[in-house]
Every structure is written in C-alpha cells, then in structure tokens.
Image (cartoon, rainbow, N blue to C red):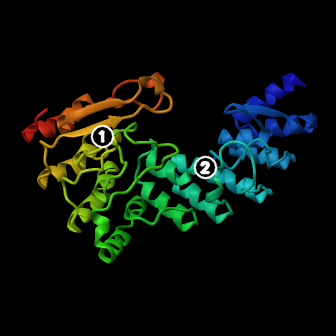
C-alpha cells in the first residue's frame, strides 16, 4: 500500500482531482491514511487544506474521507474557498483539536476575511491562545491590524478597556470619548504589553512599553492619527516612561519611533520632530533577548539620545539563525542628523 500512498500524496500536492478519485476508488483503505504536516500527523483532508489544494479537498470529501481531524483543525491556515467546502461537508469550526486554533492562524496572518468568516461560522476567539496579542504585539505589521483587533473585541474576546486598546482597534472616537470623560487617561501609565509573548518589550524594535503613556504606545505602533489625537488631547511630546527598579524605561515617545519594527514609525518620527520633540533627551533603556536568543541576555543602554539609541540598538530578527541587525535605518539617522541631533 505504501507505493499508492506516495502516489496519493503526490496527487494531492498536484491538486489532481481525477487521480485522487481513481486512487481512492481502487484502494479505499487509503481514505484513512495520515501524513505529516507542520510536525504532526494529519488526515488527508487536513493535509490538502493546509496545502491550499481546493480540487484535492473536494475530491477527498466526495470520496468519503473524514473532514474533522483529531490531530489538527483543517480550518487553520487554509483559504476561505476551502473553509466553505469543509463547512458544507460537516466540518466543525470550533472544536478541540491539537495544534493551532483557526482563529490564531487568521490572527498571525492578519487576515480580516478569514477572521470574519470564522467568527460568523462559530469560532470562539476566547478558545484560541492569545489571538489579540498576535494581532497587536508580534512581528506582523500591516494595515489590517486595526480591523483585526476590532473584529476580535466585537466578537467577544476579553480585553482591557483602555485608550491603548482603542488605538489598536483604530477607534479614535473611543479614545476621544474616554479622555474627555477622564482627562487623566492622557497622562496615565499603562502596561501596554502582551506579557505572555512580549515580556518587557523591545525585541521587535522600538522600546519597552512597560508603564508608558498612550502616546508612547501610539508612537511604537506607527499610528500617526492616534499620535496626533493624543497630542491634541494634551499628551506631552516628551513624557517619560515610568522606570523599573533599576532605573531603565524612562524614555520619551520619540525613542519608540527611531527603531520601530520595519520602520513603521518613520512618518511619526517626522511629525514629532516637526512639533518640537526633544532630540537631546537622554534615557536608560533595557533591550531584552527574545525566546530564541536567550543567550544574548539583556542589553542595557544608559544615557542614550534618540540618535545614539538608533545607532546602537541591537534590533535582531526574531529567530537566532537570522541574527542580522536591522537597524539603524539610514533614513532615521539622516533625519535626526539633519535636525542637529547628537549621539
């Protein structure tokens, strides 16, 4: 049977609907075969779904292969077209299964279409591992972040009701309402952290978000309109973070702009400079290692200016095999120097 198993897997990977039909007709025992994907056993439907092979999924389901997989959820890491096929064939979106919850997969990809489809078809975001944190605090950065956070919160995920979270949702109206009702929110310090996957901040770029203001967080995530609103509402351009017991973490918001992940905060940096943010401010900052780079230990940076921070920041990629510094960003350095910033 092994030779036909190999042929079947090849047919699935080739999305060869007719060949799959022939093999399962002539060798029906193949229908219960499992293979491996992403380091775990999966059934044939899950495998085809993960490979984004819609014709193969259709053929497997038509032949009577099991749609629900005890070791994986075929609704994770696939396409909406295939999710529709699975659902119409009795696939259960929300159920116990090993591996990634489909909500997590959608959140890691920042795919609003998939997330909305999953929520509309019974997926429970509260059963996924840190979906909101995946959207707001990890390496993903694109224009879908706000919509993803808003969908999760509207879909019932538990979250803190702070202006920082409103910023992540892109809900400037809610920030405005909250601050008008309670003006101290503009100067309050928040943890602003997804502590389970982003322990003290800094590993993805920027600076630690521990005990920082709304403005610090808006700058970190490159949310220019939210930055402008916070300042309009009274935020201090040069507000300090609340330092830890060793005196680290007292940076002003501009420090978050000079080393932001993928340089997303460069437009914010330009705006802060145009409004007179202090380029001579010094701060003590702690840059922690990430989970794959623990041997590096904390990098302690003392009395650095924004330019000095940008030049010396150990902004490494998230996997140790990619330890190529991604800072300084030359346009950041050039901009700071053009405005007389000192190292």
The residue to which callout 2 is attached is 129
Question: Residue 229 location in percent, x, y?
Answer: 26, 65
Mark 1 lies on a secondary structure that is: loop
For residue 169, side relative to residue 327 (left or right) = right
Evaluate if marks 1 and 2 touch, with contact meaning CB atoms under 8 Å apart. no
Of 232 and 58, which appears nearest the observer?
232
55 versus 114 height, above or below: above
Q: Is 341 above or below relative to 158? A: above
Query: From mark 1 to mark 2, how far is it between C-alphas?
Result: 30 Å
Q: Which mark is residue 248?
A: 1
Give residue 249's position: percent from left, percent from top: 30, 43
Q: Residue at x 23, y 68 (%)?
A: 233
Q: Residue at 8%, 42% (x, y): give it.
A: 339
Nearer-N-terminus badge (1/2): 2
Expressed as whole percent of the image width and height from the top left, the position of residue 154 reads 53, 68
Mark 1 or mark 2, which is nearer to you?
1
Residue 23 visible in image: yes
């Amino acid at each position: 049977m092994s030779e036909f198993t190999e042929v079947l897997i090849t047919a699935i990977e080739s999305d060869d609907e007719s060949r799959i039909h022939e093999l399962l007709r002539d060798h029906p025992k193949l229908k219960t075969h499992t293979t491996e994907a992403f380091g775990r056993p999966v059934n044939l439907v899950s495998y085809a779904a993960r490979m984004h092979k819609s014709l193969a999924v259709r053929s497997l389901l038509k032949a009577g292969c099991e749609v629900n997989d005890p070791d994986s959820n075929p609704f994770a890491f696939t396409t909406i077209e295939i999710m529709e096929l699975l659902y119409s064939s009795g696939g259960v979106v929300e159920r116990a299964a090993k591996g990634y919850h489909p909500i997590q997969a959608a959140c890691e990809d920042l795919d609003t279409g998939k997330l909305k489809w999953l929520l509309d078809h019974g997926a429970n975001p509260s059963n996924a591992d840190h979906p909101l944190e995946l959207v707001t605090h990890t390496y993903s950065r694109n224009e879908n972040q706000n919509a993803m956070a808003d969908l999760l919160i509207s879909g019932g995920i538990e979250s803190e009701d702070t202006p920082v979270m409103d910023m992540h949702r892109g809900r400037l109206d809610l920030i405005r309402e909250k601050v008008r009702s309670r003006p101290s929110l503009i100067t309050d310090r928040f943890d602003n952290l997804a502590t389970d996957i982003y322990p003290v901040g800094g590993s993805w770029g920027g600076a630690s978000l521990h005990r920082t203001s709304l403005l610090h967080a808006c700058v970190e995530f490159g949310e220019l309109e939210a930055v402008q609103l916070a300042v309009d509402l009274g935020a201090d351009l040069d507000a300090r973070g609340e330092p830890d017991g060793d005196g680290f973490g007292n940076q002003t918001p501009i420090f978050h702009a000079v080393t932001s992940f993928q340089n997303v905060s460069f437009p914010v940096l330009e705006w802060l400079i145009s409004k007179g943010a202090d380029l001579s401010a010094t701060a003590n900052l702690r840059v922690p290692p990430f989970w794959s780079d623990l041997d590096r230990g904390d990098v302690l940076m003392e009395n650095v200016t924004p330019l000095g921070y940008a030049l010396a920041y150990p902004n490494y990629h998230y996997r140790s095999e990619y330890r190529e510094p991604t800072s300084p960003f030359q346009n950041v350095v050039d901009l700071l120097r053009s405005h007389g910033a000192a190292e």
